[in-house]
Image (cartoon, helix red, strand yellow):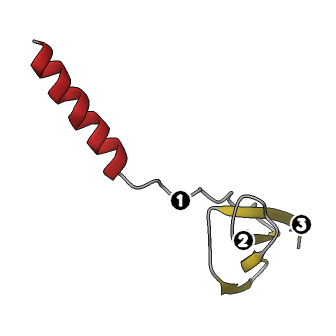
């Protein structure tokens, strides 16, 4: 019984360690709005490494997309 619990715990821990984290889900841009996502290198949000702008019939991107970003939205 104890041996099974240890094996189950070890398997659960291995699954947790091996499973990669999902990337942050970007907020959806509202209809008739233009949205800009500014991506940063880390959680300090000091170094910009990329950007994505979409909406109002326009789309532009450069650099890298990371887990750390700011979101800006404005009407067309």
* Mark 2 or mark 3: whose residue is earlier in sequence: 2
Residue 56 is marked as none
Q: Residue at x 14, y 14 (%)?
A: 2
Under circle 3, the secondary element is: strand
| Label 3 sits on residue | 74
Residue 29 in sight here: no
Q: Position of residue 42 (x, y in %)?
A: 69, 64
Under circle 1, the secondary element is: loop
Q: Nearer the viewer, residue 56 or 28?
A: 28
| Label 2 sits on residue | 39
| Label 1 sits on residue | 23
Q: CA distance from mark 1 to mark 3?
A: 25 Å
Q: Nearer the viewer, residue 60 or 44?
A: 44
Q: Nearer the viewer, residue 48 or 53?
A: 48
* Location of the C terminus (image quadrant): bottom right
**Snapshot quadrant of residue 13:** top left
Q: Residue at x 64, y 60 (%)?
A: 26
The extreme top residue here reads 1
- Report the side of 62 relative to 46 (left or right): left
Q: Position of residue 49 (x, y in %)?
A: 71, 79
Nearer the observer, disc 1 or disc 3? 1
* Mark 1 or mark 3: whose residue is earlier in sequence: 1
Nearer the observer, disc 2 or disc 3? 2
């Amino acid at each position: 019984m104890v041996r099974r619990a240890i094996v189950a715990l070890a398997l659960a821990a291995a699954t947790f360690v091996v499973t990669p984290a999902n990337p942050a889900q970007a907020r959806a841009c509202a209809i008739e709005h233009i949205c800009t996502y500014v991506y940063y290198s880390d959680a300090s949000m000091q170094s910009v490494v990329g950007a994505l702008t979409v909406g109002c019939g326009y789309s532009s991107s450069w650099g890298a997309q990371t887990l750390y970003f700011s979101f800006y939205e404005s009407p067309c």
